[in-house]
Amino acid sequence: MEQIYGRTKSILAKPTPFCAGCSHGLIVKSCAEVIDEMDIAGRISWGGSAGCTGFSSFITEFDSFNSPHGRSPTEATGLKRCNPHSVVVLYQGDGDAASIGLGDTLHAANRGEAFTVLCANNCIYGMTGGQASATTPVGAVTKTTLSGCEVPPIKLAEMIAMLERPAFVARCSVHTPAAVADFKRCFKKALDYQMKYNAYAYIEVLATCVTGSKVNPRKIREHIERNVIPVFPLGIFKDTYGD
Amino acid sequence: MSERIAIKGNEAISETAIRCGLDFFAGYPITPQTEMLEYISRRLPQEGKVFVQAESEIASSNMILGAAIGGARAMTATSGPGLALMAEVLCNFGIGRLPVVLVDVQRAFNTISPCQSDYNFLVKGLGHGGTRAFVTAPMNVQEAVDCTELSFEKAWEYCVPAILLIDGMLGQTTEGVVLPEKKTELPPPKYAVPTGRGNKAQRTFQLFNGNYRGLFGEDATEACLVDNNRMYREWVKTEARSASYRMEDAEYAIFAYGSCARICLDVVDELRAEGYAVGMFRPITLFPFPELQIQAIHGIKAALSVEMALPEQFYPDVALNLDRSIPLYSYSRCGGNLVEAGDVAGTMRKIITEGEGR
């Protein structure tokens, strides 16, 4: 019998380190599928960071490195500038990219570093148990905002799209099969732009922390559509080359 | 070519680093280091290598971390306030056993004047966690050139951070030096580089592919620290460097390092001219501290530790190793004020004639 679907080559046959219902598993798997379809797994240098995104290297075959919290784009600047042949993908959370690492994120984008940044935005600090982050929407209840978050969320995709050098900036999600397909198309384009034009790309992927945000995994689609997309609209904010 | 040239300390160190195969430099302007940044920004691209001016020292330190993980010979330079911002990354170099060269051109807090007050920070444990670096403290520009060469050699031999601890005075001093020849044979990294070249390398600080020598979690971290500590103790026996000035027949000894030791050369000569048998012992490596060499000093009637820091940072290490029967005093200037030879000589004279020096 011909096998028409299976675990993609770069995902290891290991138990997932993520909570049941977590978006990370789906996002990382989707990335691995794109990379394997493009047959570039051997060139990948995958940068995880603090928080649950750091687990992504546990289940992937790619060469990988870790950074101090928030510093992935800065560390990757050194690594990629000295290794231009590597295809560098950074996998960060919103706490990492928009809170502690806001400066790192914007400066690397502004310099137009030749790597692809993915920010899995679940609007919370998941690893530490569910505290508010820089992208937590106003009114959201978290462990440190029991009466509802007061500070407006930072919208990284919109901010990065204003800079001159980023070549591709988008916000995607993985809450429906169609959304997953859109994300994979965007991720492929980002990798193409890195390899073809040495260009910087940023893709924010809306995610859900079922444990930290206390969202019922069966209600994720509703949660994303009702609570998150109105605050963080999906779309392609910048596409310099239009390939 | 072994021609002797006149060159400023900061620039001599920079040119030496480039001749030692520097691949990547990231830095941020800070007095009294800035000439290094400017010199390297001009020279490094001439060699086809990478210079980046970072947006902060948090960024410059993380950039060199990435470069080192990627197998490149990396370096940065800063002063005290910038060094403080690098603490997290220095810890990662120490625990992750990655080679890098760092130059600290010390200044006193918000003054831009020289001091020796980053000793504890760099010698007693980098950042959080207490890991160590190979630390040298040159006394003049030629020695700074030699210590730069040594730093690159030791960083790559042991996979550790190697730190050159100087100060604003040495950084700004112009002297005649002989620079080393450009190195043509540079050993490759001793660790797998996770840059997608079929190395199958996954690097999480001290863990390779999720483990340290087959161990995980706390066991892995402990094993790593045990290995590091064994190396540090071995260094005391094999890598400690120091120098003595007129110690052969000395009855009184001065302990000092770096620019302070340079100033104290005059103190020794001044007191010798008055008939006092004074000598000076100066560490060149601060880590490993020349414990064995100091422990071997006997027959001295009194000693004076001199440094530009208060509370004392260097004095406790001297006290820990010097024969307890020798009275040890300390003298400090700080806040950006240099020790002055006349004042140190006066203090030493008082110790010799009256037995008082504290």
Image (spheres, coloured by chain):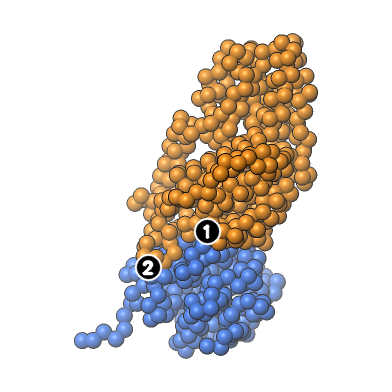
Can you tell which quarter of the image residue B208 is in?
A: bottom left
Which residue is found at the position 62% from the left and 49% from the top?
A: B14
Give amino acid for label 2. Glu
Q: Chain of mark 2?
A: A
Q: Which residue is mark 1?
A: B67
Where is residue B104? Give x, y as percent: 64, 45
Looking at this view, is A62 or A50 the one in front? A62
Which residue is found at the position 76% from the left and 25% from the top?
A: B341
Q: Is residue A123 above or below residue B281?
A: below
Quarter of the picture holding the C terminus of chain B: top right
Q: Is residue A172 visible?
A: yes
In the picture, measured across the screen, residue A50 lies left or right of residue B83, that is: left
Which residue is found at the position 54% from the left and 53% from the top?
A: B22
Q: Residues within 10 Å of mark 1 (few under 14, many from 20)?
A: many
Can you tell which quarter of the image residue B109 is in?
A: top right
Q: Residues within 10 Å of mark 2 (few under 14, many from 20)?
A: many
Q: Colour of chain A?
A: blue
Q: Which residue is mark 2?
A: A61
Q: Chain of mark 1?
A: B
Q: Is residue A133 visible?
A: no
**Could you say whether the residue bearing mark 1 is in a helix, strand or loop?**
helix
Q: Is residue A132 above or below residue B338?
A: below
Where is residue A223? Give x, y as percent: 55, 82
Q: Colour of chain B?
A: orange
Looking at this view, is A101 or B336 the one in front? B336
**Could you say whether the residue bearing mark 2 is in a helix, strand or loop?**
loop
**What separation in Å lies between label 2 and label 1 (alpha carbons)?**
22 Å
Q: Is residue B324 above or below residue B263?
A: above
Where is residue A192? Give x, y as percent: 48, 80
